[in-house]
Image: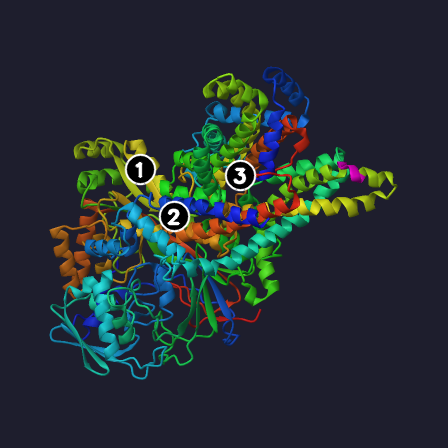
Amino acid sequence: MSQIRSNVEPSRRNFLKGAAAAGAASLLPWSQRVSSASAAEAPRTGGTLKVAIIGEPPSLDAHWTPASITHDLTWHLYEPLFTLDEHYSVIPMLAEGHSLSEGGKLYTIRLRRGVPFHNGKEMSAEDVVPSIARWGKTATVGKLLFKTVQSIQAKDRYTVELRLTAPSGLALPGLANFSQFPAIYPKEVVEAAGDGQIKEFIGTGPFRLLERVPDRYIRMGRFDRYAARSEPTNGYGGKRTAYVEEIQFIPTPDVAVRIAGVESGEYHFSDWITPDAYNRLLQNPRLDVMIVKPNEWITGIFNKKMGPFTNKKLRQAVLASLDMEPIMRAAVGNKEFYRLDPGLMFKEHVWWSDVGKEVYNHPDREKAKRLMQEAGYKGEPIRWMCTQFYEWMYKSALAAKQQLEEVGFKIDLQVMDWASVMSRSTDPKMYDIFTTGIGDKVDPTLQTPVNCDYPGWTCDPKLDAMMARLATETDFAKRYAIWVDIQKWFWDEVPVIKFGDFFSLRVQQKQVMGYANRYRPFFWNVWLAAR
Amino acid sequence: MASFLLKRVVSLLPVLLVVMTVDFLIIHMIPGDPASVMAGPNATTADIAQLRSRLNLDLPLHVQFLRWAGRAMRGDLGDSLFLGRTVNRAVWERTEPTLLLTLYGLLVAVVFGMPLGILAAVRPNTGMDRGFMLLAVLGVSIPTFWLGLIFIYAFAVNLRWLPAAGYASLSEGFGVNLRYLMLPALSLGLNQSALVARMTRSFMLEVLREDYIRTARSKGLAENLVVLRHAMRNVMVPTVTVVGLIFAVLLGGAVTTEIVFNIPGAGRLLIDSVLRRDYPVIQGAVLYIALVFVVINLIVDMLYVIIDPRIKYA
Amino acid sequence: MSAAAESSAATGSTRLANGAARRRSLFRRLAGQAGPVAGLVVLIVVVLCAVFAPALTQYDPLKLNILDRLSPPSRAHLLGTDDFGRDVYSLVLYGGRASLLVGGLVMILTSVIGVLFGVVAGFSQVLDNVLMRIMDGLMAFPAIVLAIALMAALGPRLSNVIVALSIVYAPRTARLIRSTVVVIRELQYVEAAQALGAENARIVWRHILPNTMAPLLVQATFMFAYAVLAEAALSFLGVGAPPYVPTWGNIISTGRLYIQDAPWIIWFPGLVIILVGLGLNLLGDGLRDLLDPRFRSASGAS
């Protein structure tokens, strides 16, 4: 069962710590793997790190797209105000610290001094305010947070005031969120961008952008005047040191090529390796193999704005038809790399609950057929969008399609590129289901499948009310109870199908040192040992 | 000669027109809405409509074509939807890998194919001849991408002789550039070397039958000398035109090879753009590739006329 | 096609004066050659296997059988299974249906279109200019590039692959037929027939078409081969048939990931493609040699 932290103080002064610690008090969620032999060898500076990434990022503007490729690249260039430590607690990054007042409605954020941007300008409140404001207009999580934001302004050169209309447990975790993160840009860059993407890629991060040749590489070089924090590295925060001279991110969409590339010594590091290669790669003495656990859960998102799945019974019919084990097996391959679990937050979190286990993965074809009839389904083809870009998306969809067709559904599987899936997912006329992955979330309020704005449009007054309470409540025990209710609602309403959790594989050359294997990869504090 | 050249170039103009029409039409048959693809997941309907009018997508088709063609002839092919640069720049950045790959593939085809063809022709209808020609037919039947896969795993992953994928530009050094292009060039070129072998053999056979060769032989010149001096001279030229033909085919074969070996060339740009629905780049890349093809064909036709004025054009 | 090829076809066709007798001796001579016969045999075997696929295997190639995934060749699965547990032997057999269907239909379509356009162009000066310019325009794109662009427009379906490849390859046949027609028209007996008042249609039927059969046959054989290879390449690149339709190219595409762990997935479809290509090329070569021995292997693919 789930853990409930009993020693979290709900006092206002510790509101921040409580809300975040609620999520943070979990067991170490990551298969920790820091390169061996690092004790003996001191870090070397220099060298070019070659990283094979899954594809060309749609943008280098961190606010612009939720694509994880963009995030994984750009957080070397830009930094946010807050980030997460290894327990998922929110810790300051560009912020010096903050205080909370006016009943939890006013965040006074103090900025660090003497932090230069890549172009030499010092970061100050005049940069933070427009950056955060832009993020609040552009990013999904930003928009969610800014629903309760009254204003954001600079109090003085190094202080920013974020005023909310109501207390929110979402504020700091939102500002420390991963994908589409609130990067701090220089004010001039934000102004020049207007309504479009930023045109210059300038941040405060340990690396600066050297060159981008689309589909060939993105080169980043060490920023010599980087202002590092003084505390030791802690999770994603603390001191960040750029040891390597240059990082080359090389878009390599074909996973076979990524694997071959690392095996043959062409690339130093690659992620999104298919788990089928695990056993073979383990045998290779030149490689380090790392499991990313937890990682994501595979989902099929129903279009609940129009089409057959506006009917709850049909959604329930789909759930009742599915035997998740072969689907996850087909998607992921290696048994060690997936887990069947009804929790919307991963098992490794304090938020985990197994409510819904009576419906999840209990295929019952008779029940499914009955529900189909009650829903009035007459055999109309169901348009299911997926992509082969992430091969587990396609494979899970294909396996599910077969099972559903055995029950009597007619599935029109549309395989396309990932960019098309993402853009079409916002148009309710284009699909009935689409496949995606839900990544690790810091706080349950950030769970996209139960969010009305997110594609699929899970909009329900009861749900919205519960989510609103979840956002404003501060006591962990109470929040947890609300979350369990939400999960109960979820497994009854079935707004999306959860197939299962899956873990990912990363591989690097043994030469790569200092890499800390976390949910999202980063290359500060990483150095290349002499061969 | 000059009038022939002029006539030929003039006859190219309608061809170019057809090329541009075909290129333009293809792209506009794509289902789905380019404006919404480009606007991205955060766009509102208003954003999409604004974008559509900015790209002239709401104008009638023939007006779009005229505007596009007019700009294209001035060298302006528009901006990529995805890459944040002009189509010209996107394609230009990819020319070096593709051209080098094609060139090296050509070298492989000639180096492997010509000696085989000559040897086969010098000993016609023997076991060696039949053997080589069977090999050649086999070579033509092997899919280039399949061969590339086999090579990667044999030579790159298992033997670690050569890199499995990727590319280093010439500016980084000729040697390292060659290292990356060697396996791709081999898989691309071996396929065509079979063709070169067959053609070289048949040309050689023809030439060896010629009367003056018989005369040379009857004069008692050593066989090798006969071959070397007379036949080679005459087979070089038609083979050059064959080579020119193959260059054009290799350009097409480079597309699959670039995908297999993750080489950032124009072929990969084309495929990636198709998958991303980056229309301006698809149009631009296809246009440029066709232009190169047309120019090569023109050169080949010219060479043909130079060699053998007997061949008339109907 | 190159000018040399057209030239050879034209002069070759001047030899085709007496249809029936020549056809008989053609078969006799063809049968005497080992290469083309072997090629034909291979082809027939492959086609029969594809046609009778359901009889040759008890597995449904589309049926996912996840628990058996990636198993090596065994008694239960002759050629092993892929990453979905689908039987590779069945996939190759049924994949043959798709791939050979594409090859065959493209061969027929390009021949029909080619003859149509070629004959029309051969007879009408005006249409000749227009049509041949269009054909030249289409041939100005490398085949695979045009095919990719067309597939991008039409969308990934097997029927679209057939349409796209027919558009790509028809111009070659059209040019060939056109040159043949032009040459034949100038033959004396044809001119004589015209002078005697015979209608064009009759001339086409009695004199022109029979004499285009030979080069057409050779061309068609090679078209089949190009189409099979092109379909494999398109599917491999991801712009051909949709991924869940088994074709040889698709099977290789998915098998690419498992080349180290399950090499059988890419080996067998690859070998079959080579076999089919070999058979067709041997057959085509044999036919061409017989029809015009002076230009044995003179011109190759373009």
**Is B304 contained in the magenta span?**
no
| Colouring scheme, one of rainbow, by chain, secondary structure, one colour | rainbow
Q: Secondary structure at mark 2?
A: helix
Q: Nearer the viewer, residue A508 or C67?
A: A508
Q: Is residue C8 above or below residue A234?
A: above
Q: Position of residue B209 (x, y in %)?
A: 76, 36
How packed is label 1: few (under 14 Cα within 10 Å), some, or many (20 or more)? some
Q: Which residue is mark 1?
A: A412
Specify whether B9 is left or right of A299: right
The amino acid type, in three-letter code, at marker 1 is: Asp
Q: Label 2 is found on which chain of the structure? A: A
Q: Is residue A340 above or below residue B201?
A: below
Q: Which residue is mark 3?
A: C72
Name the residue at 56% across, 23% down.
C211
Name the residue at 67% across, 50% down.
B111
Residue at the limit of the structure toward the right, as seen here: B220
Image quadrant in which you'd find residue B135:
top right
Residue at the limit of the structure toward the front, as seen here: C195
Q: Is residue B310 visible?
A: yes
Image quadrant in which you'd find residue C221:
top right
The amino acid type, in three-letter code, at marker 2 is: Trp
Q: Nearer the viewer, residue A15 or A432?
A: A432
Query: What span is colored magenta in the figure?
Result: B209-213
Quarter in which the C terminus of chain B is drawn: top right
Q: Which residue is mark 2?
A: A392
Q: Secondary structure at mark 1?
A: strand
Q: Label 1 is found on which chain of the structure? A: A
Q: Label 3 is found on which chain of the structure? A: C
